[in-house]
Image (cartoon, rainbow, N blue to C red):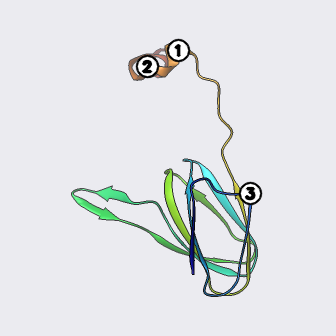
Amino acid sequence: MITTLSQAPDSIVLEPGQSLRTSVDAGAWLQLAEGRARVVSPPGWFGETVFMAETLLEEGDVHRLPHGGWIEVSALTPVHLRVHMPLVAQVSPVEARPVMRFVRLLTGW
């Protein structure tokens, strides 16, 4: 059985054979409190090829998702997974422009 959620809950409990598809923000991280699970990352590009990385998590593992998008978590055993979303940093309007961020990196301003 596959369940789909548009926003990841803080805590996910799945039985073996269950899967959850949910949206996460870039920088989110997953902490497997109990069980064993397979996580399929959001789609990414390598040249002209789309790929999705698959990661097996064991109890106690932590997995960071550098890119936001849809992930799929599949339970191999009974699973309790915690989802931690990144904190949203306050960005000034000047820093929001890529050129200004580049200038700040170069000049230290």
Cα distance, mark 3 to mark 2? Answer: 32 Å
Instruction: Assess whether mark 1 and mark 2 are in contact (beta carbons under 8 angstroms).
Output: yes
Classify mark 1: helix, strand or loop.
Answer: helix
Q: Amino acid at mark 1?
A: Pro
What residue did someone put label 1 on?
Answer: 93
Q: Amino acid at mark 3?
A: Asp
81 on left or right of 57: right
Q: Is 73 placed above or below 77 here? A: above
Q: Residue at x 59, y 48 (%)?
A: 27
Considering depth in this image, is 42 or 64 the residue closer to the camera? 42
Q: Residue at x 52, y 52 (%)?
A: 66
Q: Earlier in the sequence, mark 3 or mark 2?
A: 3
What residue did someone put label 3 on?
Answer: 10
Residue 19, x across and y down, in percent: 58, 76
What residue did someone put label 2 on?
Answer: 97
Q: Is 104 placed above or below 23 here? A: above
Q: Amino acid at mark 2?
A: Arg
Task: Determine the image quadrant of residue 34.
Answer: bottom right
Q: Is 47 placed above or below 100 here? A: below
Classify mark 3: helix, strand or loop.
Answer: loop
Residue 50: numbered disc: none
